[in-house]
Image (cartoon, grey):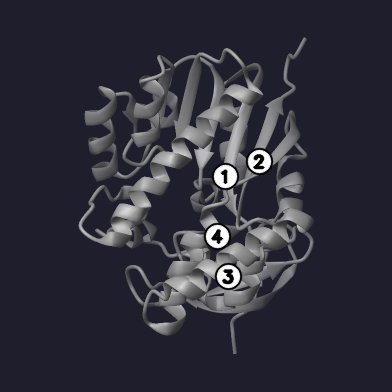
Amino acid sequence: MMESFVSPLSGNILRPQYSVRDYLVSQEVFNVFYDSDWDMLLTLPVPENLASYYESKDYAPHRLSKNSFFDLIYQVIRKQSFRYKYRILKEIYPGFNSVLDFGAATGLFLSFLQSKNIEICGVEPNKNARKTANLLTGNKVYSDLSACNGKFDIITLWHVLEHVKNPVKLIGELEKKLNPGGMLVIALPNFKSYDSEYYEQYWAAYDVPRHLWHFSPRSIIKLFSPFKFQLIARKPLIFDSFYVSLLSEQYKNGKKRWLPAFFNGLKSNLKARKTGNYSSLIYILQSTANKN
């Protein structure tokens, strides 16, 4: 029997959805619970020593190696994603001059923005990742948000909000860091996607216990409703379904099965063209605070 928990969001008694293994670091099993009021899944309980679950040479956002074919593919896709993300930023805020990247990891995206003459600041709590980021950006990445002085045209969180212990508190802090009419851009896994439904407890984007919250589009609307933001667009991260499906195949079958992963990733994207439920979604929110 899974232990029951009271939701920190709604106060509901939560029902269990899955028992999910941490395949990356500890091999421990964590329970994921569903909050129907929020249409959200929660990893509970949260480990007290959560930082230790990031200490792995295989943790993709902190990895720069190109030792394997999989590493090489990951690096190529990441570079393509930087161009795609930059096009989105230009589309939503033509002429933007400054970006704060919260959860900057090794600073590769910030370094890419620097090459476009964009003023940058980053926040990254992991010491080793931050050290690499500062080598790339010239010491523009800090451990704390308060070190990023002033306000910014755009704030980005690329697969970060699901890691944060108190997302409501963070959103309030980020709101104060945006210029009037500025944009908050958040990329998140979507557990309503086909690949999530297909792989169930083996879905790699659950990534317990590092992912504390598992969002749906409806949960994002509810999360931001108390704040001065307007959701203006959602955009897909097309490559994520293939990458997540490949890792999920490994978790489920003990090896990376490239062909099934490709077809499941493709099927997920094709279904999402009708439903909007891509494996990962970018949510674009505009600040309405003091907007003229």
The crowding category of the residue bearing disc 3, from other C-alpha atoms within 10 Å (few below 14, some 14 to 19, many at least 20), is many
At label 3, the amino acid type is Asn
Q: Is residue 24 visible?
A: yes
Q: Is residue 191 visible?
A: no
Residue at 59%, 90% (x, y): give it. Answer: 1
Secondary structure at numbered mark 4: helix
Distance from Cα at disc 3 to Cα at disc 1: 21 Å
The residue that disc 2 covers is: 283
Q: Which mark is residue 264?
A: 3
Distance from Cα at disc 3 to Cα at disc 4: 8 Å
At label 4, the amino acid type is Ser
Distance from Cα at disc 2 to Cα at disc 4: 17 Å
Of all residues, the one furthest to the bottom in this rendering is 1
Distance from Cα at disc 1 to Cα at disc 4: 13 Å
Q: Nearer the viewer, mark 3 or mark 2?
A: 3
Res 264 quadrant in image: bottom right
Q: Is residue 116 above or below residue 284?
A: above
Secondary structure at numbered mark 2: strand
Residue at 28%, 60% (x, y): give it. Answer: 69
98 or 258, nearer to the observer: 258
Q: Are marks 1 and 2 in contact (CB under 8 Å)?
A: yes
The residue that disc 4 covers is: 241
At label 1, the amino acid type is Ala
The crowding category of the residue bearing disc 1, from other C-alpha atoms within 10 Å (few below 14, some 14 to 19, many at least 20), is many
Q: Which mark is residue 187?
A: 1
Q: Earlier in the sequence, mark 3 or mark 2?
A: 3
Q: Position of residue 14 (x, y in %)?
A: 70, 72
Q: Are marks 3 and 2 in contact (CB under 8 Å)?
A: no
Q: Earlier in the sequence, mark 1 or mark 4?
A: 1
Res 16 quadrant in image: bottom right
